[in-house]
Amino acid sequence: MRTHRLGFTLISLWMAVMSVGCASVEGQGKLALDPFESTNRRVSAFNEDVDRNLLKPVASAYQKAVPGIVQDGVHNFFGNLDDIWSTANNALQLKPMETAETGLRTAVNTVFGVYGLIDWGTRVGLQRHSADFGQTLGYWGVPSGPYLVLPIFGPSNVRDAAGLVVDSQENRWSKVTPTASRYSGTAVKVVDKRAGYLGLDKQLDEVALDKYAFIRDAYVQRRLAQTRRGKPAADDGDDNKGGGNNERFDE
């Protein structure tokens, strides 16, 4: 029954993304990739307010008050859970080496790293090849569609927003019970992730004349690199090295 529901969801998402991705929006935005720019800027401003007044202060306090070894354990644990779904997406993208290495990394960290609290995988040279369902859709030719800024989640596009629905359903943490524990853990994960970006705010403000446009262009280019077929390039944001002439399937 679960397989049928997932299959129906994937088909629905595919049809929705293809229809929006191929559609044109007139009278809005200055760029074809960002027809909803005025709305996106308002959502971006809302996200910055939430970050400035809530996430950043909490992340700063977390970084100062929580011992480094505990922070590492939290980061490693949730990273290991993400690696499970990354392994599946690498397989869906027909990447045998990335699938095998990420899968082995997950097994090593789960068994020898106490469910991922200790990152033995990195210590023995097993790289993380992050992959999500939006990337998988792009790899198989689904167009990205217009650029979107999602409340709280931030930069995205129509395809990746649809992929996020599947990502959330297949994330192992979403199955944790009781609900209170799941929500508490999710909050810790968000704070831990935000703590990892502390210090970059000032640098971004210094180098970007238009912070919104800078983040948008960086996101679009990164996703283009991540959805190439063939051997990943050095800038694919996937913790890999190497290059190659690869066809882009995100355009």
Image (cartoon, grey):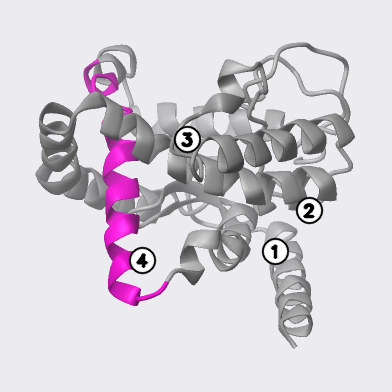
- Element under disc 4: helix
- Element under disc 2: loop
Judge by depth and name the residue closer to the eye, 130 or 163.
130
**Residue at the spot of label 2:** 142
Disc ID at residue 17: 1
Q: Residue at x 67, y 58 (%)?
A: 24
Q: Residue at x 51, y 48 (%)?
A: 156
Label whose residue precedes the other's in the sequence (2 or 4): 2
Label whose residue precedes the other's in the sequence (4 or 3): 4
Picture quarter containing residue 60? top left
Residue 177 percent coordinates (x, y): 40, 74
**Residue at the spot of label 3:** 216
- Element under disc 1: helix
Q: In the image, is residue 80 above or below residue 234?
A: below
Stretch in magenta = 177-202
Q: Residue at x 31, y 54 (%)?
A: 43
Disc ID at residue 182: 4
Measure the alpha-carbon separation of dots 4 and 1: 30 Å
**Disc number lying in front (2 or 4):** 4
Label whose residue precedes the other's in the sequence (4 or 1): 1
Q: Which quadrant would the C terminus be assigned to in this image?
A: top right
Residue 230 percent coordinates (x, y): 88, 28
Residues marked 2 and 4 touching at CB (< 8 Å): no
Residues marked 2 and 1 touching at CB (< 8 Å): yes
